[in-house]
Image (cartoon, rainbow, N blue to C red):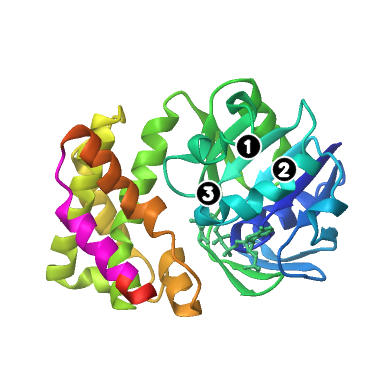
Amino acid sequence: MANITIVGPGAIGGTVGAWLAQDPRHRITLAARTRLDRLEVQTPQGVITAQPLVLTEPAQATPAEWVLIATKAYDVVGTSRWLDCLCQPDTLVAVLQNGVEHIERFAPYLPSERIVPVMVDCPAERLRPGYIRQRGPDRMVVTAGRSGEAFINLFARTPIDVSASADFRTEIWKKLCINSAGALSAILLKGAVISRHEAIAQLMRGVVRECLAVGRAEGARLDDSVVENVVSGYQAAPPDSVNSMHADRIAGRPMEIEARNGVIIRLGRKHGIPTPLNALCVDLLEAAQG
Ligand SMILES: NC(=O)c1ccc[n+]([C@@H]2O[C@H](COP(=O)([O-])OP(=O)(O)OC[C@H]3O[C@@H](n4cnc5c(N)ncnc54)[C@H](OP(=O)(O)O)[C@@H]3O)[C@@H](O)[C@H]2O)c1
């Protein structure tokens, strides 16, 4: 049995928490900012429910074997307040977030070797606290090695597809290529259907080419075909699908602008790679956020 605490039971944390709670080997606790009574997730396999212990104050928390962080990338400081109470020397902390800086984000609070970065590919949205719609299959990728294998084992009795990669850097940069282009939907407040406009598809290609160039400079092995794959992926998606940054803008929540586009500009500068289209996206999103 594993004693697992999930910090941030939103779309991803709630989905993962509800699936893990179906496995009687695990004891699941939710570390929440907003109180919730239960989890109910509409999954592709049907509705699943769970009634884990819910904490809203870090002082209530006790040490866990695993901490799964599923807050937004910009909520690092609030998230870190849970870690002192949740972590003992052998606790492993998985970071289920977008972007390419999972370890850098939490290294000020934890020894790096206890951080397990996770690439999450799962379309999910929060309907209200504890109520989530998982729109498609959940796929996660971790780094190859002992802690990656231990993370995979947690999910052995769930339909979540978790695998290990010997080239995790490439995995997260491929995901960032997809996320970077999603900025256009958040700017225009239109779902994936917007990619079917040729002018927008061209802009998306430009944003992704910049991301790809910076990713390569950072050591990711990204083929030129990534650009077209990203755009055709958006074009083939259900027209109304809403990426999480677009969902945040609609809900009036802060957006992960820095983790998804700002990082491309920042790392591009380090390598002398111009990133004018990502800079434009960041300016427009920051202006929209106010
Ligand atoms: N949703 C997707 O489809 C998707 C897919 C792949 C990857 N991702 C990535 O996964 C990560 C999580 O995204 P999400 O969509 O699940 O976000 P979300 O639905 O906004 O959930 C974030 C959760 O964190 C909670 N939270 C914030 N600060 C907290 C704190 N100090 N203590 C405890 N809980 C706290 C929020 O509480 P409140 O209820 O108070 O806001 C919310 O429940 C992001 O990096 C995102 O980019 C998302």
Between 192 and 284, the residue placed more toward the observer is 284
Q: Is residue 26 visible?
A: yes
Q: Residue at x 64, y 69 (%)?
A: 132
Q: Tell me the quadrant of the picture where the C terminus can be found.
A: bottom left
In the image: residue 76, left or right of residue 232: right
N-terminal label among 3 and 1: 3
Tag shown at residue 109? 1
Secondary structure at badge 1 equals loop
Q: Amino acid at mark 1?
A: Tyr
Q: Amino acid at mark 2?
A: Leu
Secondary structure at badge 3 equals loop
> Is residue 281 highlighted in magenta?
yes
- Magenta region's main secondary structure? helix
Q: Amino acid at mark 3?
A: Gln
Q: Is residue 111 above or below residue 274?
A: above
The magenta segment is: 273-286
Q: Is residue 192 visible?
A: no
Tag shown at residue 97? 3
- Residue 213: where, in percent of width, then height? 20, 38
The image quadrant that residue 276 belongs to is bottom left
The residue wearing badge 2 is: 83
Q: CA distance from mark 3 to mark 2?
A: 16 Å
Which of discs 3 and 2 lies nearer the camera? The answer is 2
Is ligand 1 closer than 8 angstroms to the Cβ of mark 3?
A: yes
In the image: residue 240, left or right of residue 115: left
